[in-house]
């Protein structure tokens, strides 16, 4: 399967079982519709690493949380990216839940009636901007996500090294 950036994918249970609960990942659910769905982009330093940002359709819930955070810190938080039309629905991308992974853990692309779901260009741009901000904060030693990103990245890089050694 060819993995394309800025598309939506599902992650394999194997990945969640391997890295959760240690890294506080969202659990896969398969009752009704498989979820969560993840927005994917490649790491700029190591293109074998993919970054996944969970997407939720609980738009109003996260809008309220976003507003509460904004009131507390007096500025727009980095936690969320809101989209009014992702496959005909409102959605929110949970930046604070982003994590690194590898292609082998991608289950399949998220499609609706066999068609790729288009992510608006402005949403892609905002996800990129907020993700870069998370990387900058992480590099400064700030814990900006629910996961321990420096440790998680090392685990993923170690897995890559193990693959190369074989």
Image: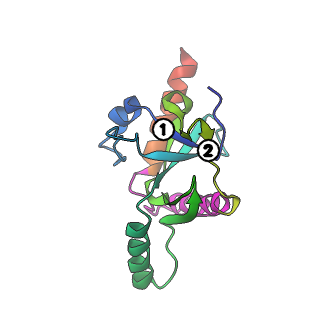
Q: Identify the residue shown where x is 41% and y is 33%.
A: 15
Q: Is residue 60 visible?
A: yes
Mainly helix, strand or loop, the magenta region? Answer: helix
166 vs 64, nearest the viewer: 64
Q: Identify the residue shown where x is 63% and y is 61%.
A: 123
The answer to whether residue 23 is above or below residue 89 is above
Disc 1 crowd, CA 10 A, few/some/many (<14, 14-19, 20+)? many
Disc 2 crowd, CA 10 A, few/some/many (<14, 14-19, 20+)? some
Residue labelled with disc 1: 10
Q: Which residues are magenta?
A: 123-148
Find out whether residue 151 is within the magenta segment: no
Quarter of image, res 21: top left
- The secondary structure type at the circle numbered 1 is strand
Quarter of image, res 33: top left
Extreme residue toward the right, this view:
121
In the picture, the disc for residue 75 is none
- The secondary structure type at the circle numbered 2 is loop
Report whether 47 appears left or right of 75.
Answer: right
Find out whether residue 145 is within the magenta segment: yes
The answer to whether residue 165 is above or below residue 53 is above
Q: Position of residue 80 (x, y in %)?
A: 49, 65
Q: Position of residue 131 (x, y in %)?
A: 57, 58
Residue labelled with disc 2: 7
């Amino acid at each position: 399967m060819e993995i394309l950036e800025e598309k939506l994918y599902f992650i394999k249970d194997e990945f969640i079982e391997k890295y959760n609960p240690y890294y506080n990942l969202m659990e896969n659910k398969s009752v009704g519709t498989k979820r969560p769905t993840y927005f994917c982009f490649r790491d700029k330093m190591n293109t074998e690493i993919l970054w996944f940002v969970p997407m939720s359709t609980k738009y109003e819930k996260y809008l309220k949380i976003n507003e509460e955070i904004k009131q507390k810190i007096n500025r727009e938080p980095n936690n969320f990216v809101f989209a009014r039309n992702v496959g005909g629905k409102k959605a929110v991308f949970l930046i604070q839940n982003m994590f690194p992974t590898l292609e082998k853990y991608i289950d399949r692309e998220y499609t609706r009636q066999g068609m790729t779901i288009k992510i608006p260009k402005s949403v892609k741009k905002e996800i990129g901007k907020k993700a870069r901000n998370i990387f900058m904060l992480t590099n400064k030693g700030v814990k900006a996500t629910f996961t321990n990103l420096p440790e998680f990245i090392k685990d993923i890089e170690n897995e890559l090294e193990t693959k190369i050694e074989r």
